[in-house]
Image (spheres, rainbow, N blue to C red):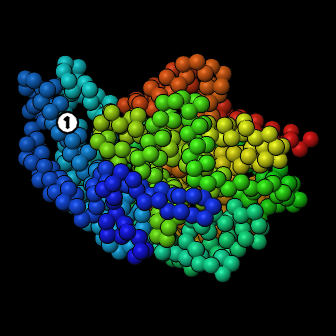
Amino acid sequence: MNSNPFTKSLCRSSSRAQAQTDAGLGALPEWNLADLYPSMESPEYARDLVRAETECAQFAQSWRGKLAGIVAGLGASAHLTEAVAAYEKLEDLLGRIISFAGLVYSGDTTDPTRAKFYGDAQEKITNASSDLLFFTLELNRIEDSALETAMNEGPLGHYRPWIEDIRREKPYQLDDKIEQLFHEKSVTGRGAWNRLFDETIAGLRFKVEGKELTLEPTLNMMQDKNGDTRKAAADALAETLRGNLRTFALITNTLTKDKEISDRWRGFKDAADARHLSNRVEREVVDALVAAVVAAHPRLSHRYYKLKAKWFGQDQLAHWDRNAPLPNVPTHAYPWEEARDTVLGAYGEFSPRMADIARRFFDESWIDAPVRPGKAPGAFAHPTVPSAHPYVLVNYQGKPRDVMTLAHELGHGVHQVLAAPNGALMAPTPLTLAETASVFGEMLTFRALLARTTNPEQRRSMLASKVEDMLNTVVRQIAFYSFERKVHTERRNGELTADQICTLWMSVQSDSLGPSIRLGPGYETFWAYIPHFIHSPFYVYAYAFGDCLVNSLYGVYQNASDGFAEKYFAMLAAGGTKHHSELLAPFGLDARDPGFWQIGLNMIEGMIAELEGLEG
């Protein structure tokens, strides 16, 4: 991408970022990262790197070894508050630096200059933050009664949610020196393997119908209206992934073993317990979700794909037809401006406030939309830090699903903007709740589009597409979770071959998708391109958690919309300050209730029944 003016200076100093024009889609915006730093070479960035190193060292000199004495003395609450506030300020500074470096890198993960910039930033931030490791460890060595008194008697109470979260980590924390070793070696350990995965994926090329494509356009072609094109894309994916399976198997084996070592040292009993802890959700709640989804396979995925196969005049659909558009239904390509207006209009019908926040992402260049060689695949909303604002990355190609993805990521963005006033320590939301606004925004957009669609065939196509998205979010993600559990369990018996990993993948996919999907040769490799397994082990159940939760919330909204928006915004604005039980209580919902998950699953089943009704 030497012709890209962002190669050397990734960020514009002007208020508008560059826009790329894609045929038929209009001008596609690129984000302006100058609200973080003007460029990779900017004096501001260099100065903050030095400041981070200096101030982290000063923080350690000021507070290390002193917290126990402070809590035992006069003015304990005020002094501890001073320390926590200083720590929070440093977390914001470090977060700003690494967020900028990560966003720059995601723009083109194949560019050596960006890759070095990101790698150097990771190393420097890891070194600087090692001086902060002692702080939470020392806090957790303070007696409960003394810390409780300090929180009750002064300003330290402001940080109670964060402190209580830290205390939950106490049983799993190690000696200070071991924690420092784990932390510093993450750069050459997990961080390095993550980077290898990213750069390998970004460098892959898939030969489809005479063209060499990157991952995103290839995956997009599996939604093409032409069946031969879908098959060609699936075959290309399989061929290229198969040629790189040894690398992906090595990455998976190494990171799975790395996690097992960490879990064993920390005392986690189950491979997913560390994720549950960080999500602030109980293992039994997740187990209940998984059990409910697996039990619902026959009435959800099996039932729907049997219906879809019938629409295609077949007994079984090939795996490359699973997300195919319905036959004989004209597809609508959404130019960027239409996608923008659709999402903002749907948000605005729910709440003008929600639309106003989302509009800023468009107006202030917080979105990167074009598909580019080397750009990170998929989509995300990065919260950066409370002193700045979030950024959204999408790979926009004008498909209806791309509009839904835009709505989804903007929901994240709205959530992150609302939670930011909680500060760097309490703004972050557990993954189980992080999908709340994104899936809700997606549902609002879908319902708005459906309401203005009068053509029966187009309505059926839209309903089918939404059901498929929900199955992908709930059934497929729980299957991913089950796959991860199998991989992590089997890895404890020794290194897994690529073929063994493929076999584990096929075992959960076949069961979740059902007999109406024919998983042909090549599909066994498809686990290799999914980044969540690498970057965030066991992240995936959060999607199903969020989708079912939002389905329940949407049911409350439909039945009693008065006052709902206010309660909804209060839930989003809470950030990470409240447990899911507290946040759902105002809506009369409880995720610990075994019947809770059925509410969300019943909504999917109802939409499938509606599709069956359209057959008559």
Q: Is residue 417 visible?
A: yes
Quarter of the figure with the N terminus: bottom left
Q: Is residue 560 above or below residue 443?
A: above
The structure residue drawn at horizontal position 66% and vertical position 37%, both measured from the top left corner, is: 448
In the figure, is residue 463 to the left or right of 166? right
The structure residue drawn at horizontal position 41% and vertical position 47%, both measured from the top left corner, is: 364
Quarter of the figure with the C terminus: top right
Q: Nearer the viewer, residue 520 or 228?
A: 228
Q: How many marks?
A: 1
Residue 546, percent across and down? 55, 39
Q: Is residue 289 above or below residue 490?
A: above
Residue 459, percent across and down? 78, 43
Around disc 1, counting alpha carbons within 10 Å, would you say few (fewer than 14), some (14 to 19), or many (20 or more)? some
The structure residue drawn at horizontal position 32% and vertical position 41%, both measured from the top left corner, is: 386
Residue 161, percent across and down? 32, 30
Q: Is residue 99 above or below residue 116?
A: above
Q: Nearer the viewer, residue 116 or 368?
A: 368
Residue 48, percent across and down? 19, 54
Residue extending farthest right? 616
In the figure, is residue 569 to the left or right of 43? right
Q: Report helix, strand or loop for mark 1.
A: helix
In the figure, is residue 584 to the left or right of 293? left
The structure residue drawn at horizontal position 84% and vertical position 57%, both measured from the top left corner, is: 328
Q: Is residue 144 above or below residue 90?
A: above
Identify the image quadrant of residue 231.
Answer: bottom right
Type of amino acid under label 1? Val
Q: Is residue 378 visible?
A: no
Q: Nearer the viewer, residue 44 or 83?
A: 44
Identify the residue under disc 1: 84
